[in-house]
Structure formats: structure tokens, C-alpha cells
Image (cartoon, rainbow, N blue to C red):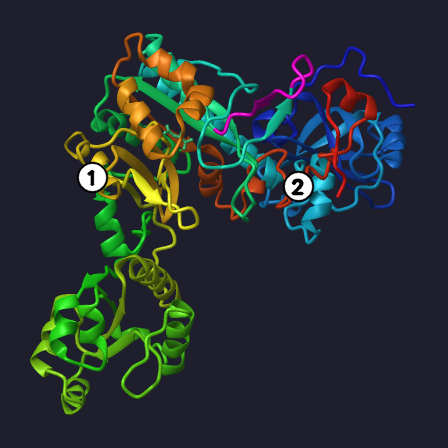
Amino acid sequence: MADVLGGLTRTHYCGSLREAQVGSTVTLMGWAATRRDLGGVIFVDLRDREGICQVVARPEVSKEAHGQADHVRSEYVLAVVGKVAARSPETVNPKIPTGQVEVLAERILILSAARTPPFPIEDEVNTAEEIRLEYRYLDLRRPRMHRNIKLRHQMTMEIRRHLDEQGYYEIETPFLTKSTPEGARDYLVPSRVHHGHFYALPQSPQIFKQILMVAGMDKYFQIARCFRDEDLRADRQPEFTQVDVEMSFPRVQSIVDLIEPLYQRVMKLIGVEVARPFPRLRWSEAMERYGSDKPDLRFGMPITDVTEEMRELGLDTFPGLIAEGARARAIVLPAAGQVSGTRMRKINEELWLGRIVPDARGAKRNLFTLKSTDEAVSSLGKKGAREDVARRMLEKAGAGRDDTLLVGVDQPGPLAMAMGILRLEMGRELRLVEESAHRFLWVTDFPLFEKDAGSGRWTSVNHPFTAPHDEDIPLLDTDPGRVRAKAYDIVLNGTEVGGGSIRIHDSELQAKIFKILSLTDEETRDRFGFFLEALQYGTPPHGGIALGVDRMAMILAGESSLRDVIAFPKTASATDLMSGSPSPVREEQLRELGILVIRK
Ligand code: ASP
């Protein structure tokens, strides 16, 4: 039987003891991290949330306490009463903050025994992640996880303070609701009362936050859980958290003015100062210059359009390809880089696999390289290319002496992507990325629609409530693909950390957008009728944003897995290994819900 706590009250956290407490009697409570019996004297390292402190049980101080210490094993929960003493100089432990002191035990209570944990509770674990997740309570006991969870708490508190100071109300919206189209599959919850009817868990609070604007709430935020049933990649969770924000009567600048200081405050938590304003790129510029809608600005290596030069150069099949609509874009590899010919060929194969263009000698390529030296240029001349154009191209792309110019030639869409990947790979490979930097950036003016490759239908790039640019509205009828959205993403170090838009506040325009998205009148009425109706009762212009909390916490904590900053995460197959969910349910429950399960 365990001891009872009785009238004991904790006076200090284990991790908080310092020399200032020497001489005072303290009561600590925590877990036995280690126990060492040095023949007569027993040392117990006692751990709690704030750290570790050494407890010493000597029979001459207390026979009873010493006797109890003898029974202590790893992860037992103890209460210790004793006097804080300064350690002798040779026993000081400079590695821990409490290393100057120890507690001489007068009483030890064993409040709870513990089974031997399946892995040691320390930061360096080699245990398989499945085991860590199955025993998540033990995994979370590790100091590093404590630090991550604390940092996440500090972050959300800082965000709450900021938004509160700016006049935002924190408002909860329902989990049991109707589908919100964010482009993923819904998690459905069957209704017991209405058989065959289902709630959808929200992919985001989007529709509700817009309705809160119709309701005159003016400024809303929520640290909201979102549910998206997607095939999981390493950096995704089926349920995730975002700071969801909406405001009435905004301009894009109003959103920027709210969010930039928010990130400044958050980054201060890890001692990083970021300067405002954050740089901004239009989506089309980002695609051209960085081949990505979330460029990593921790290194340069911008992409330069050299279509004209490649045409005039008159080499191989390139002019012909360009005549057929291909573009040519270049990056410059610094001379110091030393990328081998084999590597170049490999890159060419990887990037353009399946989209390969035969060249004059029957080999296949659409990557062209040119070293910035007189010899390389004149040898190009001998192949019949124009040397003056080669020089002009090197200069335009900013190649210095001995640098290497890498030119890709392809149709604009695939070329942008390929060059973006190439830039990232080369940046990493040549160690140009300033790893410790934090580079924020806004990407604006996304296209409103993109064509779904399979069905050939228009789909929303963001979500269907995003407003088009006013001057692009006529294009909705003639050329939807060219309509720009009042949408913006915020990017940090090549990762999208948030995104939002100014919304449509006119029900007719909203209905038109649903039409372009190929929704029938009936589907629109079924899914969004209530929303379109709400828009008809006096809707203020409004807009907002959502910021990823998990990803931000991961970046702040310097972790590489989202699971290390979420207390109870799911695996890549969307299971919770600790509770064992999802799991079958009783027949009776299914019957109540009117559900028949088809077993595979
Ligand atoms: N609802 C959007 C999302 O979850 C964000 C927004 O438009 O505010 O991505």
C-alpha cells in the first residue's frame, strides 16, 4: 500500500532549488529518476516538471527515511521532506541548475509505486516511435517533451494576449456541423436521432467565422481544432490546430498589420527578433523567381528568365522548343560549389523524367549547362552557337567568373516547378541555406481557380469564399483561369505557416462562384443555402487568416516532427496507439445509429 499524502503540501518544485534555499526545510514531490545506493548512503534524483534535484538519505539524518529510500525504484512517486544543504565543492554538478545543492531527507513517502518503464525517461531515447506513442505518458515525462509542451503553451498564450489587446473576441464554433470545403475529405459523425444523417467535423471554422461577421462580432479569433481526412504525409496530422482569425471591413494591409507583430511576439519567445515589414511577393513572381508558392528565402539563387537568349543562342533543339511555347529559366551555381557532371546528368533525369526532349545527338535532355569561362563560351561558339548571346545570358543571370549557369527548358508550369525543386536541392547541397535564419514572407494574389487535371473542372485554389480582385471580376465569365484572388499566404523558411483571404460578401457573386465550380443549384442549396441566405441580411466586407499552430510550435522548438509538439498525436495511418483508436464498436451501438458495416 502506498503512503498517503496526508497534510503534506509541496513547498518547492524540484527544479527550482538554488543556493538561496540552503538551510531551509522543503517538501518536494516528484518521480524517482535514479536511485544509487553507495553503501549506507542512498541518492535519489527526484524529477518534476521544472527539473531534477538530488535527495540524499543518510541513516544518521533519518533511519526511517533511509529505510524508505531502500524501497524506491525508477519512476516511483515520492514526497520528500528535508533540509537543503550546499554540496561540497567536489560533488557540485554544474550540468544541472540545482547542481549546487542537495536535500537531506528527513521523511520519504512513497505515494505511488511504478512498473518498470519500457524505456528510460531521458532525452536521448533510441526507442521505436510506436513504443513511445503507446506509452505516451512516459514519453511526455521526458524533459525535452516538457520543454516543447511548455513552449507551445507560451506561444498560444502570447497569441491570445496579442489578439485580446487588439480587440478580438475568442469565440468557439461547433465540432458537430456541416461540411466546410477546404479541399479535403470530411470526418463524418452519424446522428442517432436522424438515421442516415451525418455531421461533418469541421475542416476549418470558415463558414462560422464569416457568419460571426454577419452577426456584427467584428473581430473574432479561436485556437481551433480542424479535422481533415487526408492521406497523411510525414508533416500532417488528421486533426490539427490553427489560430483562426476574422475581421470586418479589412484591407489586406489590416491583416498584415495584425499578423506581423503577432509573429514578432512569438519569435521573441526563442530570442529571435524579426524585422517588419515582411517581404511580399505576388504569386506569379514567386513562381517565376523561385519556382514555388512558398519560397525559402534563407538563400538567394533566384531564377532568371532567359527564354529570349536561349532562342537567339541557336543551339540544338532549344529554339524549336521555345517556338512551341517552352520557356527557358536559369539559376547560377557558385564557382565554389563544384557540382560534378554525373550529378548534373542525374538531376536532369530526376527532374524531367517523363518529359524528356531529344537533342540533336539523340541523347535526351532539356537541361543546359554553361560554365562562365572564355573557354566554355568559345567551345559553344564552335558548336554553332552565338558567343555574344551566351555572354549576355551569363550576365543577365548574374553569373560571376567560373560560376555555372543551369538552364531548364520546358512548358511554363512544369518548368517553374522543376526549377523550384532544382533551386532547393542545389541550395541545400551547396550549403547555401542559412540554417539559423528565420525568413518570413507574404505571397499574395494567388489565382482564384485551378483546373482539376482529372475532371477538367475549375476548383478553388484556396476555398470558394475567397474574393476575386475587383478588376478581374469580368474575367469570371470569359477566362476564369486568369482571375486573381485577394488571397495571401504567410511563409517561413520555405514552409507555409498560414493563409487567408478577403471574402466574398455578396451573395450573388458567391452563387456565381459556386456555379463556376460546377455545383448545381441543388447542391449549392443543400450545402450552402443557409450561408447564402445569411449573406443577404447585411454582410460587412470581411476577411481573415488561419495560422498553423502545430507547425509553428515545431519550428520554435527546433523539432523536425509535428508529433514532438502535440501531446497526443496520431501516426501516419491516423491511429492513436495509446488508446487504440479507431476501434470497432458494439453491434448495439451500430444498431442505434442505424449503421450496417461492410467488412472488407
Ligand atoms: N479557412 C482557411 C484555412 O483553414 C483559412 C482562412 O481562409 O481564413 O486554411
Residue 192 included in the magenta stretch of the image: yes
Q: Is mark 1 on a helix, strand or loop?
A: helix
Apparent side of residue 577 relative to residue 364 in the rendered image (left or right) = right
Q: Is mark 2 on a helix, strand or loop?
A: loop
Residue at label 2?
88
Question: What's the residue at 40%, 81% (across, down)?
Answer: 342
Instruction: Give the magenta-colored segment's residue range.
Output: 191-203
Q: Quadrant of the N terminus?
A: top right
- Callout 1 environment at 10 Å: few (<14), some (14 to 19), or many (20+)? few
Q: Give the quadrant of residue 270.
A: top left
| Of the pair 536 and 440, the residue shown nearer to us | 536
| Of the pair 90 and 124, the residue shown nearer to us | 124
Please state the horizontal and vertical placement of residue 67, each as a whole percent of the image: 90, 31
Apparent side of residue 204 relative to residue 397 in the rendered image (left or right) = right
Residue at label 1?
478
Residue 120 seen from this side: yes
Q: Which amino acid does label 1 sit on?
A: Thr
> Taking 335 as reference, is 88 above or below it?
above
Q: Which amino acid does label 2 sit on?
A: Ser
Mark 2 CB near ligand 1 (8 Å cut): no
Q: Are marks 1 and 2 in contact (CB under 8 Å)?
A: no
